[in-house]
Image (spheres, rainbow, N blue to C red):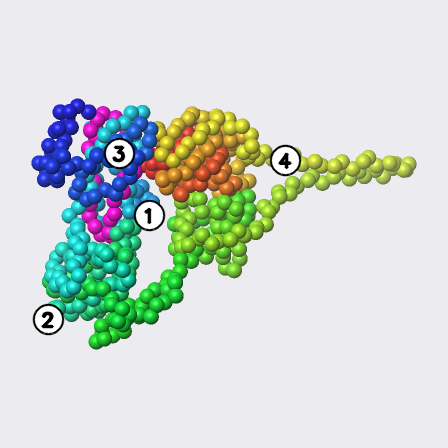
C-alpha cells in the first residue's frame, strides 16, 4: 500500500482515540497472538495461506470486529466460535468489514480465520468491546458497589502457593438480601468453573488454588447494593476442607451462620448422540445394512461402540444394537467418547436373485414310446451394476488440505449412468456410473466443515463414499434440485463422489464444488 494510505489509516486510529499510531501492534506471519480488546493489530496475509487470530469472550459479552485492508488483494474472513460454528464476515468493495455481536452465546475462544488468494498484504484488525474489563482483586477486604454494569475481578496471587480463600458477603442493609448472579471463569479457555444464580444465597466462601488465575464476574443486580470481598491466603493453621481424591470436586467452606451448601455432583460426560433431524438407524455401519429404526429430533441415544475409524456409532435402540453415521449434519455427538471400544456387527445381507422356474416337459398322451427328457436348464442370474470406488474416477481427482485456496475448488462434470443407487438403501436415489465421477484426498485441519455440492441444468443427486467406507446420499438442497453434503469435523482421507441423474437414461451437465465456507452453496 502507499505510505499516504497507511498514514491516513493510522491517523484515523488516533482520531478515534484508540492508541497512538506508533503503539499499533504488527504481528509476524508465524505468530498467533491472542487479540487484545480495543488494541489495533496489523497482520500480514501471505498468498495462499491461512492466518488465524484468537480472542477470549465470556457469555453475554458484546464485541465488534473491524477489518481494514491496507493493500489491494482478495481475501476471505470467517469468525469461528467455541462450538466450531463458522460465520463468514461480509466484505465491502474496499475489502473492509464491520461485524457486531450484541450478546455472545457462550464463553470460550473465538477465532478469526483469514485466507488470501493469489496475492497477499497487510490487514488491520480491531476487536472492540464495552464489556467491563477485569481488574485485579487486591489482597484483603474490598467493598464493591454493584449497579447497572456489574463488575469483574481478576483473581491472581503472584508469588503465593497453596490455597486462597475468597469470601463474598452482602454488606449490612443491602437489598434484596441475596447475591446477584456471578460466575468464576478460567481466562485461558473461557470455561465456567462455577456459576451461581441470583437469589440463591446471601454469602459464600470458596477455597481456590493460588496458582490458577480466575475471573470473578458479577452480573448487575435488580437494585444497587454493596458486597464485601475478602481475598486472602489460607494459612497452615486455618481449617480447610479435607483433601478429596483426584476426580472429585473440593467441598466449599461456608460461613458458619449460613445454611450448608451441597456442592453439585461431578458430571460425567456420557457419550451419546442427539438428532437434529430424522436419521436412519441400521444393523451395521454402512448404508448397505438394513434400517431397523430412526433417530428423530429430540431423541438421545447412548453410544455403546464404534467402527474402526469412528465414523459410525453403535447405539442402544430399545436394548437392540443399532448403528448411526456421525458424518452427517443431523447427528450431534455429545459427551466424552474417547473410551468407546470397537464393536462387532453382522455383514450386510447379500441380495438373493429370483430365478425363473424351470419348464417341465409333458409328453403328448398318444405317444407310447419312452421319451428321454431334455436336461434341466440352469438359471444364472446377471449381477446388477453397483458402485466400484476402485475404478479410476471419470473426471480425475485432487488433493486438498484444510484452508485450501481458492475456495471453492471447482471442476466440470456430467451426471448419469446405468447404476441405480437405490440398492444402497437409506433413501438413496439416482443413476450413476460404477466408477466415481471424482475423488478428493483431503487433509483435515482447523476448518470444522467440508462441503461438497453440484450445480447443474437438471435434477441431480450425489453419493459420497467416506474415508471410513460408508456411503452418504442426498438429493435436493437449499430449495433447489442440486445436491449438497456436509461433513462436520471431517476426517482425513479419500472421498469418492458420484453425481447422479434423478431420472433414468438422462444426463445433467454442471459444476462440482468443494468448499470449507458454509456460505457457499447451490
Residue picked out by circle 1 = 83
Position of residue 56 relative to residue 474, above or below, is below
- The residue carrying mark 2 is 173
Name the residue: 47% across, 37% down. Answer: 493
Where residue 376 appears, as percent x and y from the top left, is 78, 37
479 left or right of 44 in image? right
Check disc 4 and report its element: helix, strand or loop: loop
Q: Can you identify the residue that label 4 sits on? A: 383
Give the label, 3 or 4, closer to the camera. Answer: 3
Comparing labels 1 and 3, the label whose residue is closer to the camera? 3
Quarter holding the C terminus is top left
Classify 256 as above or below 443.
Answer: below
For marks 4 and 2, the one nearer the N-term is 2
Q: Who comes first in sequence, dot 3 or dot 4?
A: 3
Residues in magenta?
Answer: 51-79
Q: Which residue is mark 3?
A: 28
Q: Is residue 378 left or right of residue 298?
A: right
Amino acid at each position: 500500500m502507499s505510505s499516504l494510505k497507511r498514514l491516513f489509516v493510522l491517523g484515523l486510529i488516533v482520531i478515534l482515540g484508540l492508541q497512538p499510531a506508533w503503539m499499533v501492534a504488527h504481528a509476524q506471519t508465524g505468530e498467533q497472538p491472542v487479540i487484545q480488546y480495543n488494541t489495533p493489530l496489523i497482520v500480514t496475509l501471505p498468498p495462499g495461506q491461512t492466518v488465524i487470530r484468537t480472542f477470549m469472550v465470556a457469555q453475554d459479552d458484546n464485541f465488534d470486529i473491524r477489518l481494514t485492508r491496507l493493500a489491494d488483494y482478495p481475501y476471505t474472513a470467517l469468525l469461528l466460535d467455541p462450538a466450531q460454528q463458522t460465520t463468514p464476515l461480509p466484505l465491502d468493495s474496499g475489502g473492509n468489514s464491520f461485524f457486531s455481536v450484541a450478546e455472545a452465546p457462550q464463553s470460550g475462544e473465538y477465532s478469526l480465520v483469514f485466507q488470501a488468494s493469489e496475492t497477499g498484504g497487510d490487514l488491520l484488525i480491531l476487536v472492540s468491546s464495552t464489556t467491563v474489563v477485569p481488574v485485579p482483586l487486591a489482597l484483603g477486604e474490598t467493598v464493591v458497589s454493584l449497579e447497572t454494569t456489574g463488575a469483574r475481578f481478576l483473581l491472581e496471587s503472584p508469588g503465593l502457593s497453596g490455597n486462597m480463600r475468597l469470601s463474598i458477603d452482602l454488606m449490612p442493609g443491602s437489598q434484596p438480601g441475596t447475591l446477584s448472579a456471578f460466575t468464576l471463569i478460567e481466562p485461558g479457555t473461557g470455561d465456567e468453573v462455577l456459576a451461581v444464580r441470583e437469589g440463591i444465597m446471601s454469602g459464600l466462601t470458596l477455597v481456590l488454588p493460588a496458582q490458577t488465575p480466575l475471573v470473578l464476574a458479577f452480573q448487575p443486580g435488580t437494585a444497587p447494593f454493596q458486597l464485601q470481598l475478602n481475598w486472602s491466603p489460607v494459612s497452615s493453621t486455618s481449617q480447610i476442607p479435607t483433601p478429596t481424591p483426584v476426580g472429585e470436586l473440593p467441598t466449599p467452606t461456608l460461613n458458619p451462620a449460613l445454611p450448608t451448601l451441597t456442592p453439585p455432583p461431578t458430571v460425567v460426560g456420557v457419550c451419546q448422540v442427539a438428532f437434529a433431524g430424522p436419521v436412519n438407524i441400521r444393523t451395521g455401519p454402512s448404508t448397505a445394512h438394513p434400517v431397523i429404526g430412526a433417530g428423530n429430533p429430540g431423541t438421545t441415544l447412548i453410544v455403546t461402540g464404534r467402527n474402526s475409524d469412528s465414523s459410525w456409532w453403535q447405539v442402544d435402540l430399545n436394548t437392540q444394537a443399532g448403528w448411526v453415521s456421525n458424518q452427517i449434519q443431523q447427528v450431534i455427538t455429545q459427551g466424552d467418547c474417547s473410551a468407546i471400544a470397537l464393536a462387532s456387527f453382522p455383514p450386510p445381507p447379500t441380495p438373493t436373485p429370483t430365478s425363473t422356474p424351470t419348464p417341465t416337459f409333458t409328453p403328448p398322451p398318444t405317444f407310447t414310446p419312452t421319451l428321454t427328457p431334455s436336461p434341466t436348464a440352469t438359471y444364472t442370474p446377471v449381477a446388477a451394476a453397483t458402485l466400484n470406488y476402485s475404478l479410476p474416477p471419470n473426471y480425475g481427482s485432487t488433493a486438498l488440505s484444510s484452508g485450501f485456496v481458492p475456495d471453492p475448488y471447482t471442476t466440470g462434470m456430467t451426471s448419469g449412468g446405468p447404476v441405480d443407487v437405490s440398492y444402497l438403501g437409506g433413501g438413496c436415489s439416482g443413476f450413476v456410473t460404477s466408477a466415481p465421477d471424482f475423488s478428493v484426498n483431503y487433509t483435515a485441519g482447523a476448518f470444522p466443515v467440508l462441503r461438497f455440492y453440484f450445480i447443474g441444468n437438471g435434477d441431480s443427486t450425489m453419493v459420497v463414499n467416506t474415508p471410513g467406507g460408508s456411503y452418504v446420499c442426498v438429493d435436493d438442497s437449499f430449495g433447489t434440485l442440486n445436491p449438497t453434503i456436509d461433513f462436520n469435523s471431517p476426517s482425513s482421507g479419500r472421498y469418492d463422489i458420484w453425481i447422479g441423474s434423478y431420472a433414468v437414461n438422462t444426463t445433467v451437465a454442471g459444476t462440482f464444488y468443494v468448499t470449507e465456507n458454509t456460505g457457499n452453496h447451490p
